[in-house]
Amino acid sequence: MAVIEIKNVAKTFGAYTALHDINLTIQDQEFMVLLGASGCGKTTLLRIIAGLETATTGEVWIGGRRVDHLPPKDRGIAMVFQNYAVFPHLTVFENIGFGLRMQKLPNDEVKRRVERTAGLMHIDQLLKRYSGELSGGQRQRVAVARALAMEPDVILMDEPLSNLDALLRMEMRAELKGVLAESNTTAIYVTHDQVEAMSMADRISVMHKGEIVQAATPLEVYRNPAAEFVAGFIGNPPMNFLPATPKGAGKWAVGGQVIDGPQKNKALNFAIRPEDLRLADSGLTARAKVVEPLGAHLLVTCDIDGALFRAVLDSDMTVKPGDTLTLAPQPDRVRWFDPDTTRAVA
Ligand SMILES: Nc1ncnc2c1ncn2[C@@H]1O[C@H](COP(=O)(O)OP(=O)(O)O)[C@@H](O)[C@H]1O
Ligand SMILES: [Mg+2]
């Protein structure tokens, strides 16, 4: 059992606060992704869990045991980094078995574990090769196999696929997800790539400026973003926003139209995903500016009262720049945010 609990963890570097009061519980065998832009504190949080960095305040618990005063080797974790960190002058076998030798496991146990994890990562044909001769993708497989060979309770991965090209990344992410689902390992996976996060995670923790803004399943984060930041960060293109003025009794003026919304009496921001719009007789009045055929869809960038607004439409629609479009939002997909707190109100 390796539940990970992060309790009130903060981290400052001099006058700079990299993490503010982080609270997060990762369930046993869960695959948790920390997602956020560069500099938001993902690596710092991962390193604190690993014990490579000390929190300024707060506690880290793994498997019901407080570990923040323990050295990394006593925490039951293994790590995989972006830059592989495999030793080029060692063979693949020696690299994968490195941590096991450090633990002074008997030779036959080392051999058993190296062969098993090399098989899982499809590098069993490479065991005698020197790691320096391998491609980036093969080296990253070695790094993952080395971590798995430790049979850790927890595996921590920091952008492990970012140095690979797009096709290999897609292949590896499916493979990694499969291998980890079959192990009993709790995983924390850091990435700035939302597609990777959406496709791999059981839950995503969206981070922004040293805080976790929302921790939820990929679908929940996508459909019901808890804050404007999440709505504007997830999705490609992200959610559209328009200012909304209350007209009383749950009616709102948005983009030249009156629509139903929450019972509130202050200005809110209306938000809708580009794919949750369709051309209709009544709806938001938009002026098409740029039309991009993307094969499966048509991406139309519009202007609504001076605000940028995007719609993803069927690819067989004929839309030209300059056209006036009437875009109907799918009612159950509309979100409303309070501009003062930036949090969702409905
Ligand atoms: N050792 C350090 N000394 C000073 N500042 C640091 C140190 N490590 C990280 N930071 C700062 O903390 C912030 C978060 O960094 P990091 O956790 O690496 O972000 P991410 O992994 O999300 O890109 C950044 O602004 C970074 O410059
Ligand atoms: Mg980082």
Image (cartoon, helix red, strand yellow):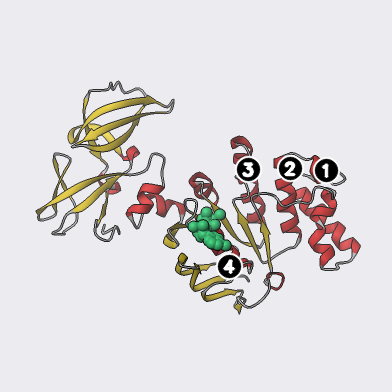
- Distance of label 3 from label 4 (alpha carbons): 23 Å
At label 4, the amino acid type is Ile
Residue occupying the point 47% across, 53% down:
36
- Viewed as shown, does residue 104 lie left or right of 235? right
Q: Position of residue 28 (x, y in %)?
A: 59, 67
Q: Dot 3 corresponds to which residue?
A: 163
- Viewed as shown, does residue 304 lie left or right of 141? left
At label 3, the amino acid type is Asn
Q: Image quadrant of ligand 2?
A: bottom right
Query: In the rendered image, which quarter contains the N terminus?
Result: bottom right
Q: Dot 1 corresponds to which residue?
A: 126
What is the secondary structure assignment of the residue under circle 3? Answer: loop
Query: In the rendered image, which quarter contains the C terminus?
Result: bottom left
State which tag comes first along the sequence, 4 or 2.
Answer: 4
What is the secondary structure assignment of the residue under circle 1? Answer: helix
Q: Position of residue 84 (x, y in %)?
A: 70, 50
- Distance of label 2 from label 1 (alpha carbons): 9 Å
Q: Dot 4 corresponds to which residue?
A: 48
Mark 1 Cβ and ligand 2 under 8 Å apart: no
